[in-house]
Image: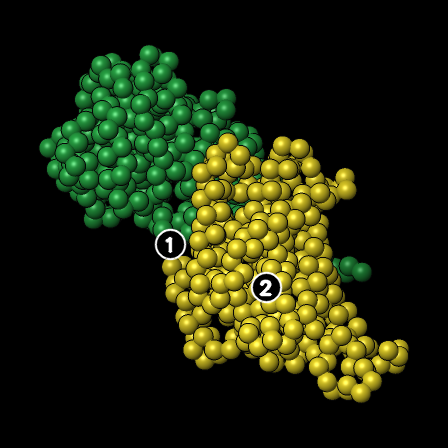
Amino acid sequence: MLNRRSLLSLGAGALALSVSSAAFAQQPTYKIGYQLPLTGNTAQYGVDFKNAAEIALDRFAKANKPFKVEIVFEDSRSDAKEGVAIARKFADDKAIVGVLGDFTSGVSMASAQVYKEAGMPQLSQTASHPDYAKISEWQFRNITTQAQEGPLNAEWMYALGYRKVAVIAEQTDWGQTVVSNFADKFKALGGQVVFSEFFNRGLADFRPILTKIGRERPDAIYTGFFYEDGAQFLKQAKQLGLATPIHSTSAAYNQQLITLAGGDSEGMKLTATFLPTNPAANVQEFVAAWKAKTGQAEPGQFPAQAYDAVNIMLAALERAHAAGNVTRKSLRDQLAATKDFPGVTGNTTFDANREPAKQLVRAQVKGGAFVAVQN
Amino acid sequence: MSVSDPGRGRSLLWTALLLIVVFAVVPALLASAGRSYLYQVANLIMIFSLLSVSMHLVTGVAGLLQLGHAAFYGVGAYCAALLATHFKLSIGITLPAAGLAAGLVAFLVALPTMRLVSIYFAVATLGIGQMLYVVMLNWVPVTKGPNGILLFGGLQFLGFDLSKPAPAYFFVATVVSVSIYVLHRLSHSYYGNALRALREDDQCADAMGIDTARLKLESFTVSGFFAGVAGALWAHTAGYISPADFNFNVSILILSMVVLGGLGSLPGAIVGAVLLIGLPELLREFKAGDYRNIIIGLVLFGAILFLPKGLIGETSALDLVRRQFGRGRSIPGHEGGVGWK
């Protein structure tokens, strides 16, 4: 039974609660989850993402916004088992309103099943699997898919007068899309794909493949690899005296490629959405912050995508906060409404299928650096 | 056997106790924590318990070092996922089908390799494991290769939707408990003793009239069957599978569970799975960060150094099982004999 004293204390408690919640209302903190590989075979990518995210968060904290944001990083080791467990963990935490990651499409998609069920917006900076964004209305990505990049490269190479092209790519979901999207367009244009093969990531010896390519005498080679494999491929191509022009995708865009392959990377052409040499203020700000934080050379394509992904998430959060309603659902709706977001990887707009449309630039390795070229 | 047989009463008591833990205590704890994350970890532990116990039958009891167990796990998962996506079948059908498919593959693999012994057998299974992995990765028209397979159906059984964490837990727990019971009966029986004889000295066992080739074939097939069942459970609970889930590292992970728990010890295999799946997640809870892998490595190293026979060595495990679950000690004239029936 309630007596007067307990009523009083109840009232005092309620008062204290409302005062403290009022204090909180002035500066609420929202939590974002970030699942990424911080250990294991792909740790170098996850660590880059973490650095990029911290740069973005720092910049956000300094901008005097009406709320605070905390990012919870969890190491998935690029393992689906761990990714799904992390997804459950994030979904359980009521304070987490949105999730970034994972790195590989496989882990992103396994986790996406949980986010779909839990109703949690998920924005991956790198998941390029054609079916990723189709899983549910909760999945977004900030990477141009090969559906956009492949045809663009096909047109570029066709315009350069190449008619017979050899295509190789790594044997992953992404590599599959590299080959199919390019080959379909190139054939439609009237070109010929004279050779097509997949290799396993981390292949040490490309010479058998290179010899087979040489035998077909293609006008050019189109490649789908990341910088580690790319450097091996370029070096061994030079050793075998293969002078065929080599084209690649934005995945190969990384200063490490030039560091590892040295002069053998000279002349390689690729498409990219991010060039650290871009004089735009936001790009130079990011590049400077990156160099200061990591002590490395210029950031590659992927950290730039992660930086933008975090910023897109923060911008959506800000709009949701301004509308006075920050929930997983409202954040998802705000993400979907992202239009012409000015990022370092170009302006980003999510289409109805939550796929980003971005501007791609043509680049070439010249004098040990990636520079923009016309053709 | 008379009803008043004390061995039987004790066995029933222990079985009931274990069932209460798995079906009442653990779910009650999970429900009170109210976190789907913990359910996920529990499911993973159970799936890997089944994997390690099924490998225990071949590697621990029969003494055949198996380095390709993840491949049978993968065959089961792919079989279940393909049946579920192409024919919209529920887990009631895909689960036994996955077991049979993996068992069949294991049987076919076993036929030519059964004459091999020790390290030669290990290398053969390593090769076969890699071969099956490469098939999953490169047979794009069927397995979709590295794209993996998405299952949209969730976990449906007899028209009930079991996709929510708690029902999924009970489903996985039931399947795993029944499977482990079968494996327990196989490894703790005259049949298991025959397998152990084979492990200790196959020529001697042969001379005693044990058909060694047949025993190896059977145990390998049964082990493959249950790995396939575990694969179906993973496919349906995760909703997405890709070849990376079944690579060589997973085979080594399962082998580590069996060795850590104790070669030849069924309770050990379960403890190994609990530890090697649970510990990394526990350390995640304590925010151990990058030290996670180092701590797990140290635990493995320390366990092998100080407990070379495993956390629950075979002798003590057999002793435990015989004393608490052993039935039929009352064979006339054989009291205190082999202890199995």
Give the quadrant of the C terminus of chain A. top left
Judged from the image, the secondary structure of the residue bearing numbered disc 1 is loop
Q: Give whichever of B304, B197 is nearer the camera.
A: B197
Q: What residue is drawn where x is 77% and y is 60%?
A: A3
Q: Colour of chain B?
A: yellow
User: Residue B278 appears at what percent x and percent y?
Assistant: 54, 62
Q: Amino acid at mark 2?
A: Ala
Q: Quadrant of residue B273?
A: bottom right
**Display coloring:** by chain
Residue position marked by numbered label 1 in the rendering = A39
Left/right placement of residue A61 relative to residue B116 reads left
Report the mark closest to the observer, 2 or 1: 2
Q: What residue is drawn where x is 68% and y is 66%?
A: B186
Subunit of label 2: B
Q: Amino acid at mark 1?
A: Thr
Q: Give whichever of A184, B65 is nearer the camera.
A: B65
The answer to whether residue A213 is above or below residue B331 is above
Q: What residue is drawn where x is 37% and y is 29%?
A: A178
Q: Are marks 2 and 1 on the same chain?
A: no
Give the quadrant of the N terminus of chain A. bottom right
Does residue A372 appear in the picture of this structure? yes
The answer to whether residue A12 is above or below residue A363 is below
Residue position marked by numbered label 2 in the rendering = B213
Label for residue A163?
Answer: none
Left/right placement of residue B106 relative to residue A355 reads right
Q: Among the chains, which one is green?
A: A
Does residue B166 appear in the picture of this structure? no
Q: Give whichever of B248, A60 is nearer the camera.
A: B248
User: Residue A312 appears at what percent x and percent y?
Assistant: 40, 33
User: Label 2 crowding class (10 Å Cα cut-off): few <14, some 14-19, many 20+?
Assistant: some
Subunit of label 1: A
Q: What residue is drawn where x is 67% and y is 34%?
A: B88
